[in-house]
Image: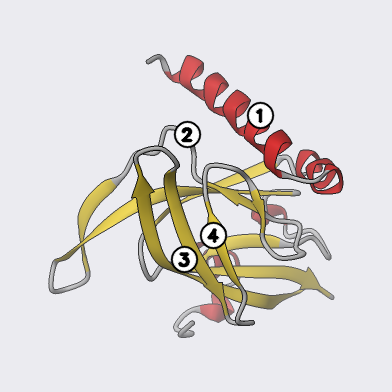
Amino acid sequence: MDHAVRSSLEKRLTRQAAQQSLSESEYLLYTGCTHYERYLCGAGKVLALWRVRDGQPIIENIYRVVSVAVDAYDGFSAKIVGDDCSEQRITHHPTQLGHNTIFANFPFFPETMYQPVGVNSRMLVRFPLVFRQASSPSTTSEGTQHLTDIPRLVDLFPQYEGVKF
């Protein structure tokens, strides 16, 4: 399938899924979030929810992907757990992460990978997750919530280099 056609179909299916699964107020918030971040995730992937206050990044929560499942009819799902003890199931239908301004979903055309991880070359299945948010984390706009993986967080804020999450 042509990339442009696939991208258009992906957006349409995701928009329809959002209309079906989100409340009216959640959908209005969702449509206001216009930036997409796509991360290749696997069990153990760590993601940071943060915002900038007074020019400094404030980490509000750390999420970990703890499991992933595939169903012949329902597609992909992943369970993520926050350091605040929250648990959420992410599917192809956009889901608001807690009461935050971040929405997560599996793309309808996920490209999975089975690749070695770490020094022991242990194999791990990785899959894409899409996070929709108000703006690009690169803008680091004051007060706006962002969700990034740890390498992107360190790239934006080098003071987190070497911090274990």
In the image, residue 38 lies at what x, y percent?
A: 51, 47
The residue mark sitting in front, 1 or 3, is 1
Q: Are marks 3 and 4 in contact (CB under 8 Å)?
A: no
Q: Nearer the viewer, residue 51 or 29?
A: 29
Q: Earlier in the sequence, mark 1 or mark 3?
A: 1
Q: Earlier in the sequence, mark 1 or mark 2?
A: 1
Residue 87's place in the image compared with 30, above or below, is below
Q: Earlier in the sequence, mark 2 or mark 3?
A: 2
Q: Which mark is residue 151?
A: 3
The residue mark sitting in front, 2 or 3, is 2
Circle 2: residue type = Phe
Using the numbered discs, state the Cα–Cα distance from disc 3 to disc 4 in whole angstroms.
24 Å
Using the numbered discs, state the Cα–Cα distance from disc 2 to disc 4 in whole angstroms.
16 Å
Circle 3: residue type = Pro
Q: Are marks 1 and 3 in contact (CB under 8 Å)?
A: no
Q: Are marks 2 and 4 in contact (CB under 8 Å)?
A: no
Q: In terms of secondary structure, where does tag 3 sit?
A: helix
* Pointer 2 residue: 108
In the image, residue 61 lies at what x, y percent?
A: 64, 76
* Pointer 1 residue: 16
* Pointer 4 residue: 89
Q: In terms of secondary structure, where does tag 1 sit?
A: helix
